[in-house]
Image (spheres, rainbow, N blue to C red):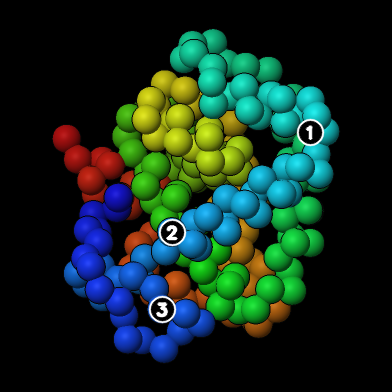
Amino acid sequence: MCALMPRSGISSVPYHHLMPVDANEQRLPSAEDEARFWARVEAAWAQCSAEANRVRRALAARAPGPDTDLSAVEGALPVFLGTLADQCRELPGGELTSLDRVLERKLCDIDRADIQAVTDGSEDGFLYARGFIVAMGRDFYDAVTSDPQVAMMDAECEEMCYFFAHLYRERFGEFPETGSGISRESCSNVIGWAG
């Protein structure tokens, strides 16, 4: 986790639901928020081609080594992103904020030097590479978290990085306040870049 250690306890801050907070009173995504986030990602992929989903699922199981042909997945990303936007565009502000909080946490947690060594890229490029890792779904995300060598060089999804924040802004005219106290920007995770 990004330099924040969860504590047991619930914030008394009024919000769309009670959520866990860390020792610094920063809001953390709940297990339910994370489950909803990954379910929405999978539901959006379900509208893409069988080939794109086959390749996407194979990424999580692949052995580290030469990169896989991602053309089917890259070609499906606009469909995936469009479907995800359609699913979420009319959600209440609190739900969009919760989804954005999960996304920023997931991006922060994989903001690590060992993952950047595989994906390469500038600070922006590494953020977009992490966007790709999250967009591919929980299985690939978990695989990369466990073994950074599973990550792919030159695989990016810039649109995913601020996806829910942009939907929130379209609806409400401002970016959401996640209250997490973390950044999704590259090199922000002190623990991921220590050493």
Query: Depth check: 151 or 6 in front?
Result: 6
Answer with mark 1 or mark 2, whichever residue precedes in sequence: 2
In-image side of 14 versus 1 (left or right): right
In-image side of 93 versus 103 (left or right): right
Does residue 103 sit above or below 101 in this rendering?
above
Q: Residue at x 39, y 27 (%)?
A: 148
Mark 1 element type: helix
Q: Tell me where residue 120 sits by quadrant.
A: top left
Does residue 193 sit above or below 165 in this rendering?
above
Does residue 150 sit above or below 104 in this rendering?
above
Answer with mark 2 or mark 3, whichever residue precedes in sequence: 3
Select label 3 or label 1 by which is in front: 3
Q: Residue at x 58, y 72 (%)?
A: 95
Let me know if residue 163 appears in the view.
yes
Give x and y (percent) for residue 112: 33, 39
Q: Residue at x 78, y 53 (%)?
A: 83
Answer with mark 3 or mark 1, whichever residue precedes in sequence: 3
Count of marks overlaid on the render:
3
Give x and y (percent) for residue 184: 43, 55
Residue linked to disc 2? 31
Residue linked to disc 1? 75
Question: What crowding class fits label 1: few (fewer than 14 Cα within 10 Å), some (14-19), or many (20 or more)?
Answer: few
Question: What crowding class fits label 3: few (fewer than 14 Cα within 10 Å), some (14-19), or many (20 or more)?
Answer: few
Give x and y (percent) for residue 149: 42, 21
Let me know if residue 120 appears in the view.
no
- Quadrant of the drawing holding the C terminus: top left
Mark 3 element type: loop
Distance between mark 3 and mark 1 Cα atoms: 39 Å
